[in-house]
Amino acid sequence: MTAAPTTTAPGVTGTWRFPVATLAAGLFAIAVPQVVGSYYVSVALTLCMWIALTQSWTILSGMAGYISLGHVVFYGLGGYVSVVTWQLLPLWVAIPLAGLAAGLFAAIIGAPVLRVRGPYFVILTFGIAELVKYIVINVEATIAQAGRLMFGTPPVTILFYVMLGLAVGATLLAWSVRRSRLGAGLIAIREDEPAAETIGVPVVRYKTYAYILSAVIPGMVGAVMGLRLTYVEVLQLFNPIISFTIVTMAIIGGSDDARGPVLGAGFLLVLSELLWSSLPQLYMVALGTLLVCFVLFAPNGIVGLLARRGGGRR
Amino acid sequence: MDAFLSGQLLFSALVIGSVYALIGLGLNLVYGTMRLLNIAHGDLMMLGAYTSFWLLSLVGLSPILSLLIAALGASAIGAAAYFGLFRRQIEISGPVEKLEANSLLLFFGLSVVVQNLAALAFTASPRAVPYLDQVFRVGEISMTANRLLTLGVALALCAATVIFLRANIYGLAIKALIQNRDAAKIVGVKVERVQLLSFMLGFGLAGLAGVLLSMTEQISPFMGFPFTIAAFVVIITGGLGNLTGGIIAGFLLGFIEIYGVVLTSQNARSIILYGVFVAILLLRPQGLLGGRRVVR
């Protein structure tokens, strides 16, 4: 594992480089819809979506080491909220509401779920996502709507701006949590949970905070993506491929550094642009192969490879 | 209430329970001996099911003969996975938790690769070639030959595996490895060879279960995951390395599923399966590790 975030003493001036660069990149990206056509706006939207999702994921799964293979559950719940409330609530209420719903769900299930450790936590999160998916499908079936048609959804440019805000927000959130007391506690939990508890880290509280923090933004991301759809099927909103892609992006990029998810998301987006539309199954094969290779040969991801090449420079 | 007590339901529950017991047994062998969480277990079943499907529809080969071919094929994949991916992982990994987490991610990547390669090769659409599906009646119960065959073969395989583990020297070595890895090494168990054997046996049983399933159910490249989940329910309920416990748990899950569906609706089937899975993990948060490490 790389150095803990508390050892930031050398190069204090450099520590603010990352958030400043993130904000600058975000401001630059505002110009994207003016410069490129709508197809590339939707590509940029997708990139922002993956960055927001993967950054959020690292707060729990990167820092505390509780790998969630079911993060789509928050995305799906958020998407469902925005789809159900569409044309009932304005966008500016529906999206935060979706985040709130996802956070609330995490808060409710957090305590019992986070007692489960290691690989059992991993498969449990997957099971919960599938369980919620089938429950929502049944709920939709009872209110007799096999699929909803969405009329008058906002233009892609508006949704892009919202998603850009979420990507920047998630990146800054992950960065600041990592530097905070909470982040130090979470990393202590990852390294040795009983030891962390012994020295006074409020283990249960911190894990629950991290779970909630990692759920809120995916809820809002799902809400935005729900409005991208013209015809809504619950299966789409809770597609386990989303969870899988998040994990793969984080592991390929490196989840131990706030730059990792950005690199991982960018790398996989290029791959998916090349393959997804024409050969979706080949894309999934490539994704699985990359995951296996990175777990085997580069467990700290692209960031780890870069650090190794730079002689351990961070 | 009459329907509830009918032999018909009992028969259905026994059939699906025997399949669950079989796949749980395979998963238990790989987990117990090496602490590898094979989340691709259901995908091996899928490959077994396709083997039987193609051999039946192209060559007209009976699934009964496909059993042998699928078992050999799945075992070969098991051997390849062991040498290619996991032997080194087991050697280099430090703490057990690290190995478990890594193995899960590796198997997950593998599972995605296998599913999508299958979808590329066979298309994603579900297929079915029913085999021996003439209905006949035994007393009150109407059954089909393929279900009876599934039950019989699955039970025989479970029994054969249990006997192998008790009577054969390699079976005893597998049990020794499950009980205490270090001690097994000290008394001269050839750990590498036994690990390879467990891999081949575990994967082979999954392939066999797939052939059985192909006789009665629709098959598709993405059919495996629910069965992986079922296998996890089985081994968590039955206890680590407790192979007989796992077999009992398999039948228990079969009963819960069939009677649960009868009490609610067909749509609830997935909810019941995943609900039981989530509930069991929440009730036993320590997972298998907290269970009694008794090998029967």
Image (spheres, grey):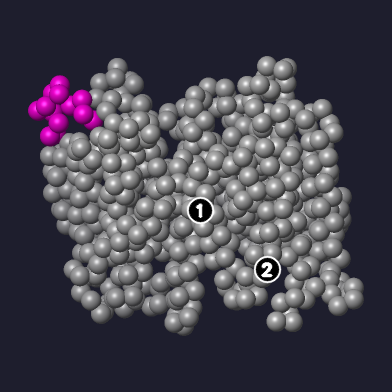
Q: Nearer the viewer, residue A296 or B97?
A: B97
What residue would you read off at disc 1? Answer: B283
Which quadrant of the rendered structure holds the N terminus of chain B?
A: bottom right
The 10 Å Cα crowd at callout 2, few under 14, some 14 to 19, many 20 or more, is many
Q: Subunit of mark 2?
A: B
Query: Horizontal and vertical percent for residue A262?
Result: 29, 41
Disc 1 chain ID: B
- Number of the label disc, if any, that sits on residue A46: none
Can you say whether A285 is above or below A80 in the image? above
Does residue B88 sit above or below B207 in this rendering?
above
Residue A258 in the figure: left or right of residue A61: left
Q: Position of residue A313 (x, y in %)?
A: 25, 21
The residue lying furthest to the left in this view is A13
Q: Is residue A59 visible?
A: no
Mark 1 vs mark 2: tell me if same chain.
Answer: yes
- Helix, strand or loop at label 1? It is helix
Q: Is residue A236 magenta?
A: no
**Residue B16 to residue A246: above or below:** below
Question: What segment is highlighted magenta in the picture?
Answer: A5-17
Question: Horizontal and vertical percent for residue B286?
Answer: 50, 43
- Quadrant occupied by the C terminus of chain B: top right
Which residue is the site of mark 2? B258
Say above or below: B187 vs A206: above
- SS assignment for the magenta stretch, majority: loop
